[in-house]
Amino acid sequence: MRRVVPLLACLILAVSAGLGAYLELGSQVGSQIVALQWKRFPIRYFVGNRDSSGVTSPALQQAVDRAFATWKAVPGTPITTEFGGFTSNQPFAADNVSVIGFRSRPDLDRTLGATTFNLDLITGEVLEADIFLNTAFNWSVEASGEADRFDVESILLHEIGHVLGLGHSALGETELTAPGRRRVIAKGAVMFPIAFGSGSVTDRHLQPDDQAGLVSIYTAPSGQRALGSVSGRVILNGTGVFGAHVTAFNPSTGAVVGTFTLNQQGEFVTQGLTPGMYVLRAEPLDDADVESFFGAEVVVNINFKPAFAATLVAVPAGGTSDSVSITVTAK
Amino acid sequence: MVPCRLAMVALLALAAADSSRADAQVRRLEAPPVVELGVSGVTSGPMSFGNASADLTKADGSPFTLFKTANSVGPERGVAAHVAVALTRRLSAEVLGGWTRANLRSRISDDFEGAAPLTIVQPLSRISVEAAGLWAFHRRPAGSLFIRGGGGWIRELAGASVLAQNGTVANLGAGVKYWWRHRAGGGLSHIGFRLEGHASMHWKGVSLGSDTVHVAPVISGGLILGS
């Protein structure tokens, strides 16, 4: 069963800020992309006072608190939060109050939850972010999960990633189960756009890809000196490939971090990497809808075979690797 | 008669003098050079970093392998130089500096989506500075067998030197010195060669595996000068 968790982003473009690592959310100002992020902390949030089947408002608040705590535990990030209380305000109301709660949206039959923003379009500062969980589905806050119910904390962890400015990661493998429907085989990021099936609590833990994305947004330059980045191009028949998914694998740590080529030259940059040696791999963006990552108007080339960079790549502390070319061939 | 007796005493005295000088010369020949300088070529066998797989996570938390890698470094080639000072007849202290070059190697296979298997490399340079103790046994004027143990600091550079990581190294091995020129007196009194094999253990530095220590066999041989 496919469960798409889209980012509802009025006036927000799911595009990269510059060529920064990871897919970050941004606001387009003229020809510039301004990264979406919180600039003032703590993030003050309220929890809706509406219960859902099996989940009370206090239980929801505790799950929200755990999910925020998981993101706040990423080293070197300044994020703090403050629970403002329970509210009758509905998520998705532009009221300058960040609300997380349940809401009935039976029309969104493939959407478990979503995030919306109210932001300063010039600076990219988030002023308000709301999350709703769709009561069209059954929910659970049990420690080990419940069959046939979706785990609140897992879905909140994903949505809070959006609240913090992260877009979707393509680090996952899926299979088609019916036209337009996919099942997740495995994934390497909480921010993959398709959730695991009901009963799974695996997404309560961040993966290196998620952490690298958050670090690239919030860690101060002084904190990033201990980390490095890799840059390069994906080339097909001598031409850059737009929208290729590039993964960087560190054999020493086992970390897998993904990014995208984000221009017609096929250039990519992945930031927030632990210094060391990396294996780079490029693959087409064919494990989820392209609209989950880019705007619907964007044309992404998925007509090529996965391939590896022809060299091991050295990522230095506080710097960038030598530029790497990954040559792919058409299917 | 008297002059004849004087001559015999003089001859005996000369003979005695010659004999004591010869004894001293033998002792000088058997004594090791106080200071030894050496330059040698170094080669080591390949060192495995083991296997590592790029894993995603399934819904039940178990790993799902995107692709596998088998990782190694070497063989290494390089040069080393040392200065040794004799502390006793058998014990010497050494300071060594070395530079070696090798290829980090990763063999990629079993890609989930069928990407072609591939072996990829990246040159690696290593600079090392070590201190060691050398114990000579079975000493002969023309050479000796010895054991050596020591440790020090390494700095490894990869990717056109963009990646630099420090580590430590410890060595334990044995070897032989042969002096084909050995004479008493000051200056350059000894010229010979030194051949050695040891196990080299590395901690940290540039790695392609999760193991904390890596071991490689090393052979070195070269010219030594003594004084």
Image (spheres, coloured by chain):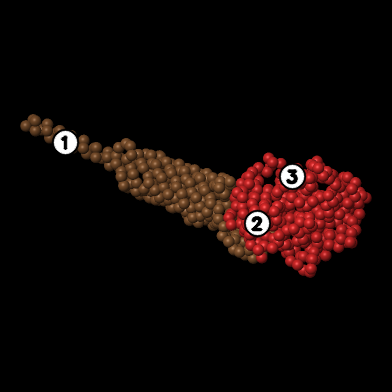
> Is residue A83 shown to the viewer in this render?
no
Task: Nearest to the eye among marks 3 and 1: give it.
Answer: 3
Q: Tell me the chain of label 3.
A: A
Q: Tell me the chain of label 1.
A: B
Instruction: Say which mark, if any, is on residue A218.
Output: 3
Residue nearest the observer in this picture, B45 or A7: A7
| Residue drawn 57% across the image and 52% down it | B207
On screen, residue A277 versus residue A75, left or right, reads left
Outermost residue, top side: B2
Instruction: Say which mark, if any, is on residue A239.
Output: 2
| Kind of residue sitting beneath label 1 | Leu
Residue nearest the observer in this picture, B13 or A78: A78
Count of all numbered marks drawn on residues in the image? 3
* Colour chosen for chain B: brown
> Is residue B6 shown to the viewer in this render?
yes
Q: Are marks 2 and 3 in contact (CB under 8 Å)?
A: no
Residue B54 sits above or below residue B127 on the image: below
| Residue drawn 67% across the image and 60% down it | A283
Q: CA distance from mark 3 to mark 1?
A: 95 Å
Q: Tell me the chain of label 2.
A: A
Q: Residues within 10 Å of mark 3 (few under 14, many from 20)?
A: some
| Kind of residue sitting beneath label 2 | Thr
* Colour chosen for chain A: red
Residue indicated by mark 1? B12
| Kind of residue sitting beneath label 3 | Tyr
